[in-house]
Image (cartoon, rainbow, N blue to C red):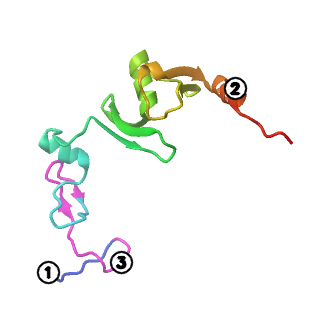
């Protein structure tokens, strides 16, 4: 099939790879490279017993917090690490209006002794009282 050009669904002649059947679920998919065997990561994990499936993955986001992907009830969800640690400590999911305050101000210090559960309003009031305003 070298040099064979196929038309895609819009009639463009830019496809060089033929659709394949997934080795796990037998669904027809459009491969990204010639060596592709599976249609999705779930099929790869199902085939290899989840050996490549990481329990947690963390990175530093643009605002300076550790953020990551964790598994909750079989689904992968994104969480900030300080919220995830507090949820594990309390044994329940946090409400949307609950804020986790870093007591020493270090966003990377996620020890339970450094985390304080508060509401959005109380957290805002606390930081506004610390703010120093310019005298005009």
Question: Residue at 38% across / 39% down in the picture?
Answer: 68
Q: Is residue 33 above or below residue 84?
A: below
**Residue at label 3?**
11
With respect to residue 68, does 4 lie above or below?
Answer: below
Left or right: 52, with 80 as reference point = left
In the image: residue 18, left or right of residue 85: left
Q: Quadrant of the C terminus?
A: top right
Q: Find the distance from the CA under tag 3 to the CA under tag 1.
A: 20 Å
Task: Pinpoint residue 129: horizontal percent, then vertical percent.
Answer: 72, 27
Seen from the viewer's position, the closer of residues 97 and 33 is 97
Q: Secondary structure at mark 1?
A: loop
User: Per the image, is 1 magenta?
Assistant: no
Q: Foreground residue, 102 or 36? A: 102
Q: For the residue carrying disc 3, how many other residues have a C-alpha within 10 Å: few (<14), some (14-19), or many (20+)? A: few
- The residue identified by callout 1 is 2
In which image quadrant can residue 11 be found?
Answer: bottom left
The residue at 40%/25% (across/down) is 85
- Work out how far the residue at label 2 is from the one at label 1, CA to CA, in angstroms: 67 Å
> Badge 2: few (under 14), some or many (20 or more) residues near its Cα, within 10 Å?
few
Q: Secondary structure at mark 3?
A: loop
């Amino acid at each position: 099939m070298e040099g064979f050009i196929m038309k895609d669904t819009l009639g463009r002649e830019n496809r060089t790879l033929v659709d394949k059947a997934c080795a796990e679920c037998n669904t027809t998919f459009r491969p990204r490279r010639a060596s592709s065997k599976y249609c999705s990561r779930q099929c790869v994990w199902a085939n290899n017993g989840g050996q490549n499936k990481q329990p947690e993955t963390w990175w530093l986001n643009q605002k300076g917090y550790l953020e990551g992907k964790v598994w909750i009830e079989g689904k992968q969800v994104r969480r900030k690490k300080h919220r995830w640690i507090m949820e594990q400590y309390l044994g329940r999911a946090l409400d949307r209006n609950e804020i986790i305050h870093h007591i020493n101000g270090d966003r990377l210090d996620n020890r339970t002794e450094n985390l304080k559960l508060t509401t959005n309003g109380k957290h805002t009031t606390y930081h506004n009282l610390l703010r120093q305003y310019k005298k005009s």
